[in-house]
Amino acid sequence: MVADWYAGLSGLEVEQVWVWSGWVRIVLFDPVPRAAGDPYLDLNDFQFIDAEGKEWDVRIEDDPRTAGPVLGLLRCRLSTAQTKDEVLTLVFDNGARIVGDLPL
């Protein structure tokens, strides 16, 4: 069920990126309104691989500045979202990726 929810986000555009104490929220725009509003992903410690292939360890709690490169996802589309062994992998249409533990 969880994997299906993530897979259902494929094709949606990143509309907002929020950073606050301990978390990054990626808000996706869904042209088909959902009862709960636009879907989002809350992530804490994860690896971000940018469109050029540079790897960034994002550790919001230790250093919120590490989230800066994630802003490059604005207006990108989520190509695929998959889960395996409690690890979430998000791939975006610009080639960037996020890999980290499934959010609780």
Image (tube, rainbow, N blue to C red):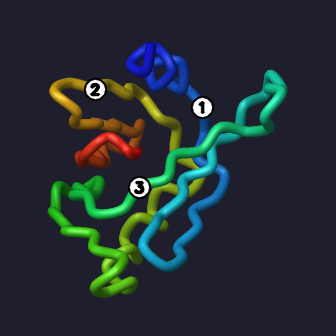
Closer mark to the observer between disc 1 and disc 2: 2
Amino acid under label 3? Leu
The image shows residue 88 at horizontal and vertical percentages of 29, 36
In-front residue for pair 91/39: 39
| Circles 1, 3 touching at the beta carbon (< 8 Å) | no
Tell me the distance, in whole angstroms, between the alpha carbons under discs 1 and 2: 17 Å
Residue underneath mark 1: 12
User: Residue 63 is drawn in which quadrant?
Assistant: bottom left
Tell me the distance, in whole angstroms, between the alpha carbons under discs 1 and 3: 17 Å
In-front residue for pair 101/55: 101
Residue underneath mark 2: 83
Residue underneath mark 3: 43
Secondary structure of the residue carrying tag 1 is loop
Amino acid under label 1? Leu
Q: Is residue 103 above or below residue 20?
A: above
Residue at x-position 27% and y-position 36%: 89
User: Mark 1, residues whose alpha carbon is within 10 Å: few (<14), some, or many (≥20)?
Assistant: many
Query: Relative to residue 29, is residue 86 drawn left or right?
Result: left
Closer mark to the observer between disc 1 and disc 3: 3
Residue at x-position 72% and y-position 31%: 30
Image quadrant for the N terminus?
top left
Query: Relative to residue 103, is residue 17 drawn left or right?
Result: right
The image shows residue 85 at horizontal and vertical percentages of 16, 27
